[in-house]
Amino acid sequence: MTIRNVLRMGDERLWQRAEPVSQFGAPQLRELLADMRDTMQALNGAGLAAPQIGVGLRVVIFGALQAAQPNPRYPDAAKVPYTVLINPVITPLGDELEEDWEGCLSVPGLRGLVPRYAQIRYRGLDEHGAPIDRTVSGFHARVVQHECDHLDGILYPMRIRDMKKFGFSEVLFPNREMQDE
């Protein structure tokens, strides 16, 4: 399909709450999902939310598109199954938080240490309207929380507790080859 432009932090559309999807199987939804997949793959993203490409719907995709190859932006991360998640609901399973480094296609070139729930349950619908219900932890839980934040107008820098742990990738990790976020 089409590789879409990703909105960058500062664009007011990223601060808006997305609307639920009510029609499944529509050509517009199929086209949106194809564009999101192509965009995420072209940019080596671990996930993408519809608001990041200017579409105010509660749609996220995430996961490895090429399971044989690690994501160059997250080479040490555990594999996450490719998932289309529509109208998601996240429930934390416990109070334990884990801090880890995050980047974002809407915040290129930067990384931040972000606290996230260690284990979550997420529910929603796939592209056909079939239910999804998973309990996950680790990188999988982090990616889902990050992408779903976009649906509520939240970017990861808003969650950083210590701004000394936020900066340009090449400064924070000088010996690590990273692609532009």
Image (cartoon, grey):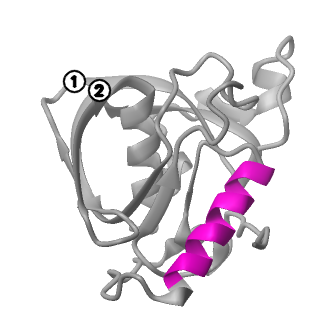
Give 1 or 163, whichever is nearer the viewer.
Answer: 1
Residue with the mark numbered 2? 118
Report the amino acid beneath label 1. Answer: Glu
Residue at image position (63%, 79%) is: 54
Would you say residue 154 is visible in this rendering?
Answer: no
Report the amino acid beneath label 2. Answer: Ala
Residue 110: give its label.
Answer: none
User: Secondary structure beneath disc 1?
Assistant: loop
Would you say residue 162 is visible in this rendering?
Answer: yes
Place of residue 22 in the rendered image (x, y in percent of width and height, measured from the top left): 30, 87
Q: Is residue 176 magenta?
A: no
Q: Is residue 37 magenta?
A: yes
Q: Where on the picture, by quarter, is residue 142? A: top left
User: Secondary structure beneath disc 2?
Assistant: loop
Residue at image position (78%, 73%) is: 2
Residue at image position (69%, 31%) is: 71
Residue with the mark numbered 1? 96
